[in-house]
Image: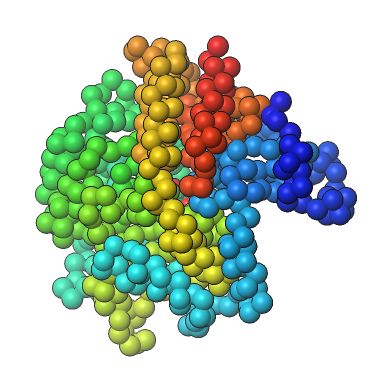
Amino acid sequence: MPPSLSASRAASVPVSEENRAAAPATDRLLHWDRDHVWHAFTQMQEYEPLLIESGEGAWLFDTEGRRYLDGSASMWCNLHGHRHPRLDAAIRGQLDRVAHTTNLGLSNPTTVEFARRLVEVAPDGLEKVFFSGDGSSAIEAALKMAFQYWLQAETPQPKRTRFIAIGEAYHGDTLGAIGVGGVDRFTAMFAPLTFEAIRLPPPGFSGPSEGMPAPTLGESLAALERMLEEHRGTVAALIMEPLVQAAGGILVHPPGFLRGVRELTARHDVLLVLDEVAVGFGRTGTLFACEQEQVVPDLLCLAKGLTAGYLPMAATLTTERIWRAFLGTHAERRTFFHGHTYGGNPLAAAVGIASLDIFLDEQVLEGLAPKIARLGEHAARLARLDHVGDVRQCGLMLGLDLVADAASGRAYPWEEKRGTRACLAARGHGALLRQLGDTVVIMPPLCVSLEEIDLLANAAEAGIRMATA
Ligand SMILES: Cc1ncc(COP(=O)(O)O)c(C=O)c1O
């Protein structure tokens, strides 16, 4: 069983006894959960409920007072911990002013300030911020902006209607996002509803066609060059996650891939959309992953860590060049006719500003190196387990492939759900982890301590041993 709340922590149990007494009992909630809540990416027939009631720092507490380390950062978005006093205060402060006003033709001081702060920290040249609600919406906005840009550019190029995307890419679940997505089990069924992207195999990964040799960095870039030639004048943009394809399975690109893609797209005047929904805000060791190869995209998509994992908000940042193509009188119909009700929500903006302050005041980025190194030590150790195959790490992201045979890399039959079983077993050791197929992922909040990383790795090991015995 996971360790229950220690006496010393009991005083800081985040839910008051009074509130607990007023809440429906766990059994009842579990029933209601099964009866009424359709959980994301979950086979509801096999759903194993767990009711998380509160959190503090890197820890989450269930309705029975058991605690778990948040090893997936509440789906890769929590940065500074749960119930961080400054983040909580920022939201309360904003609530004293207003919770929500629309940004369709109106503005709000907090949202304006947040846009300004984002531009200050973003790679040079990204000066315009379009707010939306979640990562998929940030992607939709970027794709539509890229498409419309070419219709309205100084020299219009209306034939530029296609997108290049990376094999095994994941950019969200809305129809446009799955059009550029490349994880078959998420997208194939919906193919009739969406558009077909031109697909570039990522370097180092053979993808779904097993047995095919993985392209090298040089081969991947050469393939891109051929693609750009072949589709000359018809590609609006290339979209990719910089450095790591997170939901694709923590696929880490070799150094130079991002830089190479930027050079080739620039040479062919193809826009570059970078999706930093998962890798942004410190996850790879720098505030933005693209900084590591000194790349500035034409469009940058942010979500998840944008509000430190507190509230839904996303942003699509772009350049003066793209923005200008949308300017004109109402009658000219150059407007970006796209928006979301809660885009630019002031509560989310307030917590986003507070998060950027914490990055500076608590020297969050400076503190990451030892944590990344500690996770790396565990990665090397876990790689030696009998049923662990490939192990990939970038910053505070780690993926451990579970395989039937480590020597040959032979996969387990998909139906055996080894990854899911390993993560469920890790719960019994006090860690909440989330798998990607048979890849066990460790991606904690940035505030995690070295000891907490040890606990996560040990729980993952115990879970993997149980699931592969
Ligand atoms: C790289 C990437 N892009 C886009 C998305 C979609 O974001 P959301 O789930 O907020 O729509 C995700 C979600 O995991 C992601 O990892």
Image location of residue 147, percent across then percent down: 30, 64
Count of numbered badges drawn on the protein: 0
Q: Is residue 133 above or below residue 367?
A: below
Which quadrant is home to the C terminus?
Answer: top right
Residue sitting at x 58%, y 78%: 101
In what quadrant of the picture does the N terminus appear?
A: top right
Q: Is residue 326 visible?
A: yes
Render colour scheme: rainbow
The residue positioned 48% from the left and 34% from the top of the image is: 441
On the image, the x and y values in percent for residue 460 come to 53, 26
The residue sitting at the front extreme is: 8
Q: Residue at x 80, y 53 (%)?
A: 16
The front one of 266 and 193 is 266
Image vertical order of residue 280 relative to residue 92, above or below: above
Q: Is residue 34 above or below residue 348?
A: above
Image location of residue 6, percent across then percent down: 73, 36
Q: Nearer the viewer, residue 228 or 109?
A: 109
Left or right side of 378 for 43: right
Confirm whether residue 314 shows in the render. no
Vertical placement of 23 versus 48: above or below?
below
Residue 420 lies in quadrant: top right
Q: For this view, does 147 lie left or right of residue 364?
A: left
* Image coords of residue 145 (percent x, y): 33, 66
Residue, x 30% and y 85% (percent of image)? 328
